[in-house]
Image: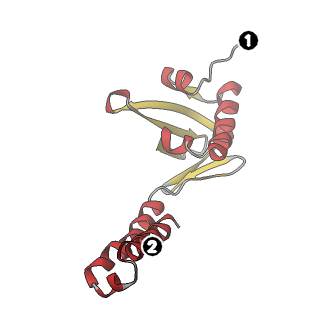
Amino acid sequence: MSGLLMSVILIGFGTLRDWGIDWMSTWWLWLFVIWPPFVFYFIGRSVGISAGADWFAVKNGYVDTYELTEVKVVGTSGGLAWDLELQDKSGNELSINLREIQTNRDLWDLVYNGIVYSVHRGSAKTNPHALDKLKLRKTC
């Protein structure tokens, strides 16, 4: 959708800039108008994140968030990027950049509730980064 919007903006800009549609007869100017939908289409398909009440899925797998056995937060790039690694009792594993999942608040709420449930029930092992970054320590 955003690629299509960018193309419409470029068509509008070209039309206003030349006070007409004469620019459309120049073939190479169409290259600027045509590329955005294709680029944004493939960028949008690269992530593929979804979640339900008790599951979390990315393109290469899924986990049952209420049956987790391991929750890790691993720092990459010297701690500038954090990866969330999850494993459930069926042996399913997945890893995703923490920032990617936290940008969608509703999706993150579903996943985080399952993580908190599994950790506080005692069935999921964690590492210190997971306890700190995800605020999973019990305060009693």
Mark 2 surroundings within 10 Å by alpha-carbon count, few (fewer than 14), some (14 through 19), many (20 or more) = few
Q: What is the quadrant of residue 10 in the picture?
A: bottom left
* Name of the residue lying farthest toward the top: 140
* Residue 23 percent coordinates (x, y): 32, 81
**Kind of residue at badge 1:** Cys
**Kind of residue at badge 2:** Gly
In the image, residue 26 sits, relative to residue 121, either above or below, namely below
* Residue 73 percent coordinates (x, y): 48, 31
Instruction: From the image, state whether disc 1 or disc 2 is nearer to you.
Output: 2
Of mark 1 and mark 2, the one earlier in the sequence is: 2
Mark 1 surroundings within 10 Å by alpha-carbon count, few (fewer than 14), some (14 through 19), many (20 or more) = few
Q: In the structure shown, which secondary structural element does the residue marked by tag 2 occupy?
A: helix
In this rendered view, identify the residue nearer to me: 18 or 79. Answer: 18
What's the CA distance linking mark 1 and mark 2? 60 Å
Residue at 32% x, 28% y is 78
Residue at 56% x, 40% y is 102
- The disc placed on residue 3 is none
- The disc placed on residue 140 is 1
In this rendered view, identify the residue nearer to me: 44 or 119. Answer: 44
Q: Which residue is mark 2?
A: 12
